[in-house]
Amino acid sequence: MAAAALRAQLNAHIAGMYTECVVDEDMFEELREEGTAVEVSRLFINDAHEIIDDIHTLMEQPQVDFDEVKALTQQLMRCTSSK
């Protein structure tokens, strides 16, 4: 019962990400069929987390290097691009 509820919640979450264009449905389905969706998702989350932490650290400095913040932001945007 609990597993079915968790699977339904996960499926609803994934459907919401498709609707919001956070995830490219065709790409995710291809990764799922290949059995690599979980690994690719984990790698993306880890990379994005590191970049966001780096941006946060920079923003906490007394003098913010906005060129470095911009470079990290662009790196994050490249991570989220499906192309």
Image (cartoon, rainbow, N blue to C red):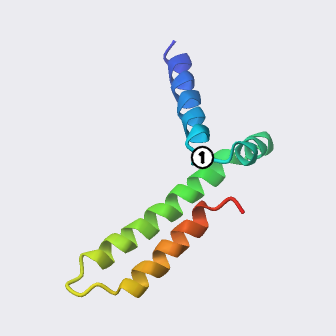
**Residue 56 at what x, y percent from top left?**
32, 70
Of 4 and 48, the residue lying toward us: 48
> From what the image shows, is residue 42 above or below residue 11?
below
Tell me which corner region of the image, top left, top right, bottom left or bottom right, holds residue 68: bottom left
The single residue placed furthest to the front in the displayed view is 20
> From what the image shows, is residue 77 above or below residue 61?
above
**Residue 26 at what x, y percent from top left?**
75, 44
Q: Give the residue drawn at x 42%, y 87%.
A: 67
Q: Is residue 15 left or right of residue 55?
A: right
> From what the image shows, is residue 68 above or below residue 22?
below
Q: Is residue 40 left or right of residue 20?
A: right
Tell me which corner region of the image, top left, top right, bottom left or bottom right, holds residue 3: top right
**Residue 79 at what x, y percent from top left?**
59, 65
Q: Give the residue drawn at x 74%, y 47%.
A: 31
Q: Residues within 10 Å of mark 1 (few under 14, many from 20)?
A: few
User: Which residue bears the numbered disc 1?
Assistant: 21
| Mark 1, secondary structure of its residue | loop
The single residue placed furthest to the left in the displayed view is 62
Q: In this view, does 56 lie to the left or right of 79?
A: left
Q: Which amino acid does label 1 sit on?
A: Cys
Q: Is residue 59 left or right of residue 11?
A: left
The single residue placed furthest to the top in the displayed view is 1
Q: Give the residue drawn at x 57%, y 52%.
A: 42
> From what the image shows, is residue 47 above or below residue 70?
above
Of 71 and 47, the residue lying toward us: 71
Q: Quadrant of the C terminus?
A: bottom right
Q: Give the residue drawn at x 52%, y 74%.
A: 74
Total number of numbered labels? 1
**Residue 46 at what x, y percent from top left?**
51, 60
